[in-house]
Structure formats: C-alpha cells, structure tokens
Image (cartoon, grey):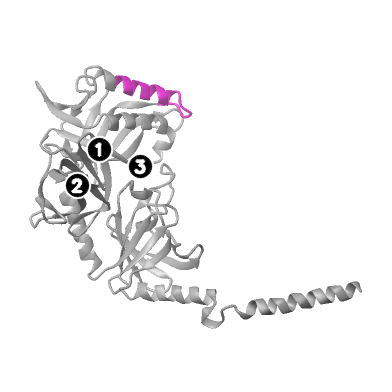
C-alpha cells in the first residue's frame, strides 16, 4: 500500500508538472532566446556606426566631471577605445551578460577606460569609475544608448558619432585649452548675479551667488562645455557654454548671454611656484603652525619621517597641476616626493587672485604619509582663494596669502614659472 501511495504521488506530480509548462513560452518567446536576440541586436547596433560611439564616462558620480571616450566596436567581442586624456587607441574585449538586465562589460584591461577604475598603489580606489554597465534603454532612432554604471549606479550615455572621432577630440582638446583656468564675466540667472570660474582639469564649474558656493561637474564638448546636471536658479537654467569663434568668450545655450573669458596675472594651471615654510620670515603664523603640526604628525606615524620646507605648487610638467612635498621616511623611502593632483582657476576682476581644489592623490608616497599629507591639503584648500603679491625689495619672490587671512596665513614663494 505504501508503494501505491508513492506511485500515485509521482504520477500526480508528473501530470501537474506537464500542465504547468503547457502555458510556458516556446521557441523565440523563451526568455533566454529573447535575451540572446536582444544582445545580438545590440552588437549589430554598436558595430553599425562607421565612426563609433562617444561615451561620457562619469567616475565618482561627478567628482571629476565627465570624461569623453571614443569606442569603435570592431567585432562581436572587440572594441577600440581612446579618450580625451589618452588619445592612443587600445583594444579591449567586451561581452554581454544577463544580471539584473542586459549588462555590457569591458573585461580586458584598456588604459583609456580602466585607468578610472583600476586600483593602484597610492590610488586605492582609482577615480571610482565604471567598466561594467547595465543597458537601460535605446532611443527610438538608435542614436543613443543609456547605460547605468555597475559601480557608481550613475546614468551615462553612448552617443553615435557622425564624424571622424579624431577631429572631434581635437575640438574637445581645443575647448579645454581655451577654458581651463578661466573666469567668466558674471552671468545673470534667476535675477541673481552669478560668478563663474572653470576648473578645467577637475572639470568643475565653481559658481558663487548670494552666500552660496557650488561645484558643478561638466564635460568638455567640441563647442565648449556641457553641465552633467543642468543648473537652475529661479526660472533660468544653465546647460551649456559655447565658445565664440576666436575663443575669447562663451555664450549660454539660449543665446541670450555672452560672457568674456578672464585670466589672472598668474595661471597655476600652466605655471608653478615653490612655497617656503622655512621660518617665520617665509610663512605666516597660522601657515607655519599648520606645517609644524604636519611635520609632527608624520614623525609620530606608522612610517615616521619628516618633510622638506619647500612645496611645489602648480603645473610642473605636461601632466596635471599638483602639489608636491619632499619627505624622507626613516629606514624606508629615502628622498621621496609625494604628489597630489590639484586644479587652479582665476577669479573675474581679481588679477592677483586664484582658487584651488583637490582632484586625486597621485602616487605611492601618499600611502606612507597620507595622514599628514591630507591634513596639509585640507588646510591649503580651506584657506583658498589666495592672492599673489610682490614683495617690496625682493625681485625673486612673491607673497601668496589667503584672501580670508592675509596677515596670518601666507607663504613666501618663487615667481611663478611656466612649466615648459
């Protein structure tokens, strides 16, 4: 009798299972088949563009603005990529998968793309970027593919390119060269006067109005720049700034306002200076006390050491501007430089002033002195903007002082020198 009940239960299960699957999709309607067809359609779409696609990558959810990359899908699993920062094309493999939607993954290292997500010594989270994306939607005309970053969860777009990407990137580079480090004549937005300065390496607009200050991430375009998120005051919205023909001014997207570009006397996005913390003769009390505390912090750290009293500040090479401290770690790194990428911009109507912001740590040395270095950086950026003034009777040096605390937070510095 026991075997009869077992057999009956088995037959019941079999027949109910058959009935359960009678209404399931078959053939092309299977989910797996539909996904395969979707991914193949995506491959065909990506490969159909003669000049490839433009991806505005947004690492760190906008902390570094948007970076333009050209992607040319050359086969069903290979893509050639270059960027506005790395214009040597490199090949990578890619594939589609199904995980919470159709995912596009670039899975072999490509300098142009993976430098923004690849951890390194001294840069533990890189730029906090993406190389794995979920495909959210394709526009009806097939010219725009909206992606979501697997790491940042931010939305980005692949846009079909209709011209040689090399010429397009040349225009982007020209936009960056024309706009970085510049301030704009004030704009009128929502009945308010808005001051704007451009951090061209950090890709951020520094805007000020009333008692408000904001950093707005943007991406360079062939015509100027585009804000990643439109900026609205009252009934007015700022989306783009487009350069005029001779690149001396920009116009808002509605064409109603034109603002001239302005550069201060010294542009530390193209020049550098050497700050001195040697003694009370070369630094104000607040600046010198801070640097002394930085020294004491490093001396008591896991890797004890000390810093030199000269600090390089600005663009010292063809790379990005930076701040560099010389230091010696006891029994470890002898005579090492630690550097951190910075950016600089002008302030409209203030020829002697500049403002600075942080970008990202640069090298391994920060690993051994990051607590002291970071404290120093916080102080430097917190006391910005600065003024550069001549020193009476001293033709070789200038005085760089915090606009907010000129009598106590200042450093003697060399005359700013072009990096070239």
Question: Which is nearer the N-term, disc 2 or disc 3?
Answer: 2
Whole-Å distance between the Cαs marked 2 and 1? 19 Å
Residue 324 location (% of width, % of height): 30, 35
Which residue is at 33% across, 32% downward? 377
The tag on residue 180 is 2
Looking at the image, how many numbered discs can be counted on the residues?
3
Local crowd at mark 1 within 10 Å, few (<14), some, or many (≥20)?
Answer: few
2 or 1: mark nearer the eye: 1
- For image coordinates 89% across by 74% down, the residue present is 3
Is residue 388 depicted above or below 201 in this figure?
A: above
The quadrant where residue 163 appears: bottom left
Quarter of the image that includes the N terminus: bottom right
Residue 33 is situated, as x and y percent measured from the top left of the image, at: 52, 77
Looking at this view, name the residue that lies furthest to the front.
Answer: 235
* Label located before the other in sequence (1 or 3): 1
Q: 327 left or right of 405?
A: right
Front residue of 155/244: it is 155
Q: Main secondary structure of the magenta part?
A: helix
Residue located beneath label 1 in the image:
213
Q: In this view, does 223 lie above or below 16?
A: above
Kindly identify which residue carries mark 3. 362
Q: Mark 3 Cα within 10 Å, few/some/many (few <14, many 20+)?
A: many
Kindly report which numbered mark, 1 or 3, lies closer to the viewer in this rendering. 1
Residues rendered magenta in the picture:
288-305
Whether residue 358 is visible, yes or no, is yes
Q: Rounded to the nearest whole Å, what is the CA distance between mark 1 and mark 3? A: 27 Å
Q: Which residue is more in the foreground, 113 or 274? A: 113
Which image quadrant for residue 405? top left
Query: Element at badge 3?
Result: loop
């Amino acid at each position: 009798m026991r075997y009869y009940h077992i057999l009956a239960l088995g037959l019941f299960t079999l027949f109910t299972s058959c009935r359960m699957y009678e209404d399931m999709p078959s053939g092309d309607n299977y989910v797996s088949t539909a996904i395969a067809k979707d991914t193949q359609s995506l491959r065909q779409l990506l490969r159909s563009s003669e000049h490839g696609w433009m991806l505005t990558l947004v690492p760190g959810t906008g902390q570094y603005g948007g970076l333009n990359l050209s992607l040319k899908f050359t086969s069903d699993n290979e893509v050639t990529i270059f960027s506005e920062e790395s214009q040597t094309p490199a090949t990578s493999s890619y594939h589609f998968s199904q995980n919470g939607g159709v995912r596009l993954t670039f899975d072999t290292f490509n300098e142009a793309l993976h430098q923004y997500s690849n951890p390194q010594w001294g840069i533990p989270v890189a730029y906090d970027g993406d190389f794995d994306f979920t495909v959210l939607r394709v526009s009806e005309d097939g010219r725009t593919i909206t992606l979501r970053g697997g790491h940042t969860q931010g939305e980005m777009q692949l846009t079909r390119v209709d011209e040689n990407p090399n010429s397009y990137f040349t225009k982007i580079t020209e936009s960056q060269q024309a706009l970085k480090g510049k301030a704009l004549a004030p704009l009128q937005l929502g009945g308010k006067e808005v001051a704007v300065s451009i951090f061209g390496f950090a890709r951020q607009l520094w805007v000020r109005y009333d008692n408000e200050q904001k950093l707005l991430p943007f991406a360079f375009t062939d015509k100027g720049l585009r804000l990643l998120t439109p900026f609205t005051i009252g009934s007015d919205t700022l989306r783009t700034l487009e350069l005029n023909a001779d690149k001396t001014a920009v116009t808002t997207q509605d064409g109603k306002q034109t603002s001239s570009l302005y550069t201060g006397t010294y542009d530390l996005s193209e020049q550098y200076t050497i700050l001195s913390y040697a003694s009370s003769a070369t630094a104000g009390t607040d600046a010198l006390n801070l640097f002394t505390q930085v020294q004491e912090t490093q001396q008591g750290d896991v890797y004890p050491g000390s810093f030199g009293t000269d600090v390089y500040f600005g663009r010292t090479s063809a790379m990005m501007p930076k701040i560099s401290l010389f230091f010696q770690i006891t029994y470890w790194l002898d005579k090492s430089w630690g550097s951190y990428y910075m950016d600089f911009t002008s302030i409209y109507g203030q020829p002697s002033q500049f403002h600075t912001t942080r970008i990202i740590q640069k090298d391994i040395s920060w690993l051994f002195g990051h607590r002291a270095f970071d404290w120093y950086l916080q102080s430097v950026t917190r006391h910005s903007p600065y003024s550069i003034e001549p020193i009476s009777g001293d033709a070789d040096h200038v005085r760089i002082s915090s606009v907010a605390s000129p009598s106590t937070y200042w450093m003697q510095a060399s005359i700013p020198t072009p990096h070239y």
